[in-house]
Image (cartoon, rainbow, N blue to C red):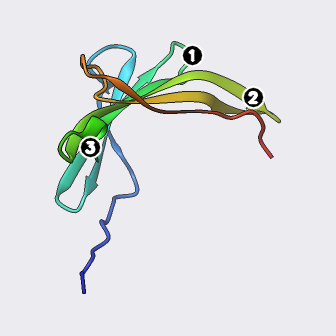
Amino acid sequence: MIASRKPRARAIATFRGRPRGPDADSTLATWHIDDHVETVQLGVAADGALREISMSRGGNPGGAPHGRHPFGIVVEDQTTFDGIRLRSKVRAFWEWGTDRQTAASSSELTSFP
């Protein structure tokens, strides 16, 4: 029998850097999960819309050894459905920001209930 343990995440992320990240158009959000710290960089447009997410993610992209790898998500479009603005077209990439960057997935939301 294999014992498993669910991680316990804090309900609230901590934002750093006024709350900017490495540049004026980004912010960093940090979560504490047990003894592990996870940081995500969020890129935002001038109007505050989410444009990009980058983080480390577990996996084995392209057959690489399983481990933590750079991962990024690009928000290409937003659409308003019944007054609710949602990210409607996104693409995700393994090895984000490196010369080995490869597409992981993409999705498009065309309707909302």
Label 2 secondary element: strand
Whether residue 40 is visible here, answered yes or no, is no
The residue sitting at 26% across, 45% down in the picture is 38
What type is the residue that disc 3 sits on? Asn
User: In front of the other: label 2 or label 1?
Assistant: 2
Q: Earlier in the sequence, mark 3 or mark 2?
A: 3
Whether residue 51 is visible here, answered yes or no, is yes
> What label sits on residue 76 in the rendered view?
none
* Position of residue 75 measured from the top left corner of the image (x, y, whole percent): 53, 25
Picture mark count: 3
Measured in 3D between alpha carbons, the distance from the residue under mark 2 to the one under mark 1, in whole angstroms, is 15 Å
* Position of residue 31 measured from the top left corner of the image (x, y, whole percent): 30, 49
> What label sits on residue 60 in the rendered view?
3
Q: Quadrant of the N terminus?
A: bottom left
Please give left or right for residue 112 compared with residue 55 in the image.
right
Q: What residue does disc 1 label? A: 47
Measured in 3D between alpha carbons, the distance from the residue under mark 1 to the one under mark 3, in whole angstroms, is 35 Å
Please give left or right for residue 5 compared with residue 11 in the image.
left
The residue sitting at 41% across, 22% down in the picture is 43
